[in-house]
Image (spheres, rainbow, N blue to C red):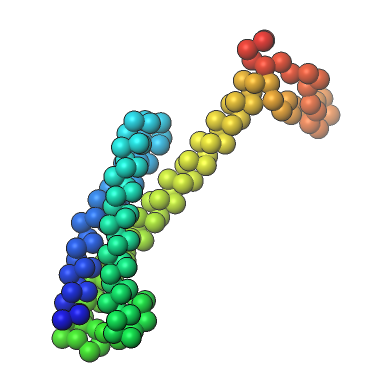
Amino acid sequence: MHDTHLLQLIIDDFAPAQQLLELLQTESLALHGRDMPLLEEILAHKQALIILLEQHGRKRSEILASLNLPTNRQGLEQLASQSSIGERLLGQSDVLTDLLAQCQAANANNGQSILVQQAATANQLKILTGGEPPALYDARGSTSKLAKPRPLSQA
């Protein structure tokens, strides 16, 4: 009974996890194109999918905990060893784990893209507002600072 319910929860997470992966891939394109309206839309959908996946994850953990099993892969393996659908349970769990790992990797790539864009924007703002003077090479090959840079707006 618990094993079939757990299997169904895992299978139910395939569609939202796949949607999340597709959203993350679309988010990557939107980040590179700096498409803010699309990014806002993606964020709303992404949050809803993450909440749903977290709820299902908690339910799976609760099922394992109610059976006095660890709430991790080891607990799932113990349950599977006592179940007639144990191989299917572990196989489907592996598929979901792989799909979620792809989501994490895509999210990490998007995070890196955001950090790079933030650094570029900060650098551009410094140039526009006349912040830190740029370091230039002098005749000896060492860096030197310009005396007093002016903001681009006053140049």
Q: Which residue is rendered at x = 29% and y = 81% of the image?
A: 66
Residue 51 as seen in the image, left or right of residue 155: left
Q: Evaluate whether residue 76 shows in this view.
A: no
In the image, 63 versus 30, the foreground residue is: 63
- The image quadrant that residue 39 belongs to is top left
Q: Which residue is rendered at x = 22% and y = 60% of the image?
A: 14
Residue 7 in the image, given as x and y percentages of width and height: 19, 73
Please tell me whether residue 63 is drawn above or below residue 97 in the rendered image: below
Q: Evaluate whether residue 60 shows in this view.
A: yes
Residue 105 in the image, given as x and y percentages of width and height: 40, 55
Please tell me whether residue 70 is drawn above or below residue 19 in the rendered image: below
Q: Which residue is rendered at x = 18% and y = 74% of the image?
A: 5
Please tell me whether residue 19 is drawn above or below residue 90 in the rendered image: above
In the image, 45 versus 117, the foreground residue is: 45
Name the residue at the right extreme: 140
- The image quadrant that residue 97 belongs to is bottom left
Dividing the image into 4 quarters, which one contains the C terminus? top right
Q: Which residue is rendered at x = 42% and y = 45% of the image?
A: 110
Name the residue at the top extreme: 155
Residue 86 in the image, given as x and y percentages of width and height: 21, 82
Dividing the image into 4 quarters, which one contains the N terminus? bottom left
- The image quadrant that residue 4 belongs to is bottom left
Residue 105 as seen in the image, left or right of residue 1: right
Residue 89 in the image, given as x and y percentages of width and height: 22, 76
